[in-house]
Image (spheres, helix red, strand yellow):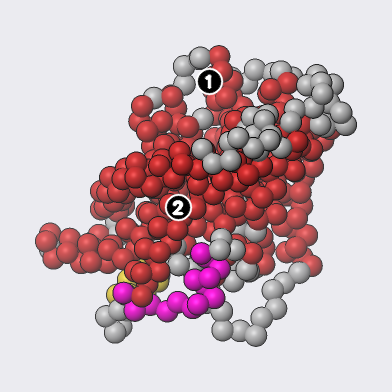
Amino acid sequence: MTGLRGLAAILVFGFHFTTFQFVFGPTGGLEFAPLTRPRFLTMSGNFAVGSFFILSGFVLALTTREGTSLANFCAKRVGKLYPVYFVTTALAIGAIVVLGMPITTENIVLHLTLLQSWVPFQEIYTGVNPVTWSLSTEAFFYLLFPLALFVVQRLSTRALYWVLGTAVFLEFALPLYVMHYFTVKTSGGHLQYFSTGSQGGDLVYWLTLPFPPYRFLEFLVGMVCCVLLNRGVLPTIRQRWAWAWCAVAYVIGTYLDGPLQRTAVGLVALPFLVVALAQADLAGRWSLLRGKVFVGLGKLSYGMYAIQLLVVLPSEPFVMRWLSSLFGVSASTLGEPLWKVLVMAAYFGVVILLSVPIYRYIEVPAYDFAKRLYRSRKGSPMFAAPESAGKPAL
């Protein structure tokens, strides 16, 4: 499962590299210029983020032990999430100021408090460090997790299957409902980095991208799959069939409208892959994602995710201008696929190198310190297993 994070890290980097770009404006300053990417690359980002959210719910449900105090749980979540987030957010704010780009106090405050995903305006939830809307969303998952785990562990197996079905239904139904009956009313003046006309409009784009309660459905599905696996009621899912089903969903999602493409299709396929990989891990069966490369990338994935656009966006215009001068080629030539792949691979290597010290000197020490906090406190009843694992209380 750690290897799946590594694969997702590759997919999300490719997605971001082909989505965000700074260019030199008429006055010589840097300006944001969204890119037009092939439809199949759009699904790489959707699948990557969806797998992160499902994995998060699954792994938290798997690793949260009975006897854990609520204070210790909260300390570990803060220690895991916030130090890397704070450092990279501070770097992003500093870069924006140095580059002379606009930023508001509201945006800074919302980002430092992990609240940006709750605001339906692009300059807020993709402002500062564009990728960190998902961390704001993840923070909401952590707040709900203790209560959600308490309830899920006490539901009958049949009820858990109903939860899975309901979550998938809501993933498809809510975007369509909101798209037809609601809209965002503003007084104008809000930046639109991305056109949302083909995505169902601004409100649906926000709903299906960062809105925490909607994305919680993916986290919840991960939790439920873990509980069902622990109960031993899930059939063995072969990895090849799980991969094949994900490939089919990927292709279908490529041709669906944005509101369904972004999250709903992935929720139909990705849980099968997560369960298949978990079963392979537990049984000690071979898996491509258990190789050193994918596991290593999985460990570094958080730092890679948080730092990648801070590396790419400010430097790419200068790098491309330098390459144009060095090789005597035009900017349009550098935009061709071969050049783009070569530049992207070079940047990917740089991001990996920079994520190593983030992992070693920020992420790991902060989490190790947080794990030791409040360990002696009484275990929370929220994490207590039901009286009979085979006969849930509800």
* Residue 369 is at least partly visible in this image: yes
* Image-quadrant location for residue 277: top right
* Residue 245 is at least partly visible in this image: no
Of helix, strand and loop, which one carries label 2? Answer: helix
- Left or right: where does residue 172 sit relative to residue 287? right
Span of residues in magenta: 98-112
As for residue 111 lying within the magenta part, the answer is: yes
**Residue positioned most to the front:** 376
Q: What number is the disc on residue 67? A: none
CB under 8 Å between discs 2 and 1: no
**Residue positioned most to the right:** 394
Residue 392: x, y in percent?
83, 26
Q: Nearer the viewer, residue 53 or 386?
A: 386
The kind of secondary structure the magenta stretch mainly shows is: helix
Q: Name which residue lies at 70% across and 78% down.
A: 185
Q: Name which residue lies at 49% across and 71% down.
A: 108
Kind of residue at badge 2: Pro
Of helix, strand and loop, which one carries label 1? Answer: helix
- Left or right: where does residue 115 sit relative to residue 38? right
Residue 259: x, y in percent?
65, 56
Mark 2 or mark 1, which has the lower sequence index? 2
As for residue 107 lying within the magenta part, the answer is: yes
Residue 378: x, y in percent?
68, 35
Is 91 rendered above or below residue 51? below
Q: Residues within 10 Å of mark 2 (few under 14, many from 20)?
A: some
* Measured Cα–Cα span from mark 2 to mark 1: 30 Å
How many marks do you count on the picture? 2
Q: Which residue is mark 2?
A: 83
Q: Name which residue lies at 29% across and 84% down.
A: 27
Question: Where, quadrant-wise, is the C terminus in this rendering?
Answer: top right
Q: Which residue is mark 1?
A: 281
Residue 26: x, y in percent?
30, 83
